[in-house]
Image (tube, rainbow, N blue to C red):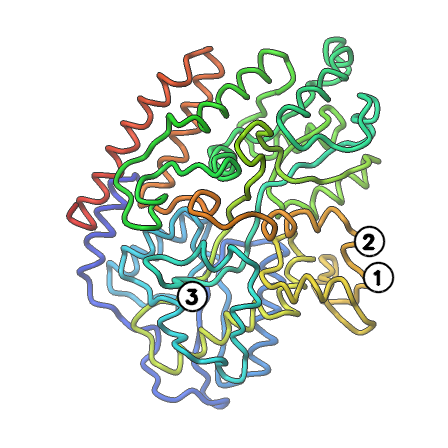
Amino acid sequence: MSYRHILVVFAIALMSIAIPVSAQETCTADSPCDIEVWVIFGDHRQDWTVDAANRFNEQYPQFNVVIENPGNYTQIVDNYTLIREEGGEYPAIVQVQDIQQQFALDSGFFVLFEDVLGDREEVLDIPTNLDDVIDGFNPYYTLDGTLASFAWNSSTPIAYHNMDLWREAGLEEPPVTWQELRAGCEGLRERIESGELEACASWPFTGWFVEQWMAQQNQEWVNNGNGREGRGTEVILDSPGMIAVAEFYQDMVAEGFYLFPSPDYFGSLQLFNQGEVAVTMASSADARFMDDAAAEAGIDLQTSLMIYNGDAEGGWNGNPVAGASMWISNGLETEVEDGALAFLLWLSNTENSASWHTASGYVPVRDSSVELLGRLEPGNEIFWDRDENARTDIEDADWFAANPNFLTASTQLGGGEVTNGTLGPVFGTMSETRTLIQETMERIVAEGLDPATELAAASEQATELLQEYNLLFAGE
């Protein structure tokens, strides 16, 4: 579905009549109310989520939470929008990607999490305890001053290092800045030029990483406080921070240190797992996959913060939350709405958030989950065994001591300064702009173009798209 098609469908859907998921007045164990939840996962992560839903249903038999997988992030939005536009029955909870949250807000399809919660400290005996959520998570999903949705599958890009190769380059610790990376790569130049290594580094060439680098440099790239102090109306892609990213890529490619991966996101990860490069970067949600692959290949794997611009003011300032959050549909019966709210709080309680982390590599949402993983006792049943599709004990008393590569993401997300720059932007055409950034950066690097000129042109294009969106949704 094209960008303009999506906008038209959304606009039409805003005028459609909402059909509640359930018209049932009373939810009982004999006649439970259905709570349908849409998620993108179709692998072991869906198995974990279904198991979690079943355990919730056992504890709250007046509800029947059903997990469905209608497709990827884009397909979820498209399918949900069409159902609402056609007046059909729709799910109670929808998993919405971070870059789509302005769409979710503007659509009028959802109630805001904080509005549903009100001043309650618990829902169906489940504590809310929002103060326990890791710093930066709730501010990221706060729109127009209200917490709009609740974090669940939260991630951040981190670096994955082959320490055997770095030690050959003379490094005992992995490089964590652009400048340290280039110096470390110099130590591998002979092996690269001889063809023993494909390159020094390779990671997915994605606009997502550029966004993260802007946040690390604490630079806003949408006006009105990155769209967080008012609706964004201008996209600024030719800032010093964005130009620095383009020049970093140009330098790395010119030196033969960075290899463009295949179009497949996992192309660069495969290069790393084959020992062809010393470092890659990917989502922290890939931590379990990368850890298992490195062990199988005999690679001494060590993770670090996402490699950042050490010359930026303040060095590393922080990384925004990525992944997705859970939105509650409007038009639900009160009991169903409370059940949906309770399920989200229960899904991300201390124990479940810790278990979800072991199953996926996604960051635990709560500080108490991180603490729990560091002081485990027998009978914890927190680890998700993918072969058995069941929760089992973590035998170690400290999960992170036994699996240090899993702690990096929590450290990164919990250690930064919370500013409009580090939170990242919110605006209606963020998805299209991410693609535009990626295409512009690739053209700058591949054709040796002037970053300032190309990024200024991209700014105009991105701003025009945003203004079209705002005109349709906000009359601006």
Q: Identify the element where label 3 is drawn.
A: strand
Identify the residue shown where x is 73% and y is 24%: 276
Mark 1 and mark 3 lie on one chain; the one further toward the N terminus is 3
Look at mark 1 in the image and give the residue it sits on.
396
Q: Identify the element where label 1 is drawn.
A: loop
- Amino acid type, mark 1: Asp
The residue nearer to you, when weighing 32 against 400, is 400
Q: Please tell me how crowded label 2 is: few (under 14), some (14-19), or many (20+) other residues with Cα within 10 Å.
A: few
Q: Nearer the viewer, mark 2 or mark 3?
A: 2
**CA–CA distance in space, label 1 to label 3:** 35 Å
**Is residue 169 rendered to the left or right of residue 280?**
right
Quarter of the image holding residue 96? Answer: bottom left
In the rendered view, would you say 233 is above or below 125?
A: above
Q: Position of residue 335 (x, y in %)?
A: 39, 83
Q: Are marks 1 and 2 in contact (CB under 8 Å)?
A: yes
Q: Please tell me how crowded label 1 is: few (under 14), some (14-19), or many (20+) other residues with Cα within 10 Å.
A: some
**CA–CA distance in space, label 1 to label 2:** 7 Å
Q: Position of residue 60 (x, y in %)?
A: 54, 83
The residue nearer to you, when weighing 199 against 315, is 315
Look at mark 2 in the image and give the residue it sits on.
402
Look at mark 3 in the image and give the residue it sits on.
93
- Amino acid type, mark 2: Ala
The C terminus, quarter of image: top left
